[in-house]
Amino acid sequence: MIKVAMRVSEALLVDGTNRFCILTYGIFADLDFCSAHEHLLISSSDNVSQIFALRSENWKNGVLLSEISVLSEDDISQTVAIEMLRMFRSGSCIASFCMFDGSFGTYDDIFSDELASYTYAVCFAANEPIIVSDASVLKLDAWRAIMNIFRLRLRSEAPEAPDTHF
């Protein structure tokens, strides 16, 4: 469960340490999944702790997860943007997003209404990441509506990205 925080960085702080854990997910079609995974492994920086390949027969696409640690709160937004865009450089990434640790369970969790407040960054095309640093924004109905539009877009039901101005 996420702690009540005013800044997203507070929820990313690993208990008992001075480091922040960023979990970046990339959604890839099955045809490109293995090569994207290999590319991520090869292109990993020293800060990347682990890369996981997540798949299930019930999922429409595969999900790659990059876990990275940063020591400075000032580096979080830039690191999130870099990691999300790295997913797109790894292959035909459909979308990239960041959720708090322990939030992701299945493919249906992606942009779900129940977990909208646990998703603090999203990107559907390289160079358009949306990164929220104020945790109170994640509780807004407007953010939940944006996640709903992204969920529809992921399911190919909504062709355009939503207006993200609050």
Image: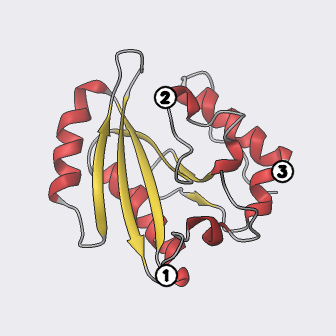
Q: Is residue 46 visible in this depiction of the protein?
A: yes
Q: Mark 1 vs mark 3: which is more N-terminal?
A: 1
Q: Is residue 121 left or right of residue 162?
A: left
- Residue 93 picture location, percent across and down: 36, 41
Q: Nearer the viewer, residue 1 or 53?
A: 1
- Label 1 to label 3, Cα distance in Å? 29 Å
Tally of numbered discs: 3
The image quadrant that residue 29 belongs to is top left
Query: Mark 3: few, some, or many residues within 10 Å (few <14, many ≥20)?
Result: few
> Which residue occupies 24% across, 69% down?
45
Q: Mark 3 vs mark 2: which is more N-terminal?
A: 2
Residue kind at label 3, given as amino acid type: Leu
Query: Mark 1: few, some, or many residues within 10 Å (few <14, many ≥20)?
Result: few
- Residue 65 picture location, percent across and down: 37, 47
Q: Is residue 126 visible in this depiction of the protein?
A: no
Q: Nearer the viewer, residue 100 or 87?
A: 100
Q: Is residue 76 left or right of residue 31?
A: right
The image quadrant that residue 138 belongs to is bottom right
Residue 62: give its label: none
> Which residue occupies 65% across, 49% down?
118
Q: Is residue 117 left or right of residue 12?
A: right
To which residue does mark 2 refer? Answer: 107
Residue kind at label 1, given as amino acid type: Asn
To which residue does mark 1 refer? Answer: 18
To which residue does mark 3 refer? Answer: 140
- Label 3 to label 2, Cα distance in Å? 23 Å
Question: Considering the numbered disc 1 on the image, is that residue within a helix, a strand or a loop?
Answer: loop
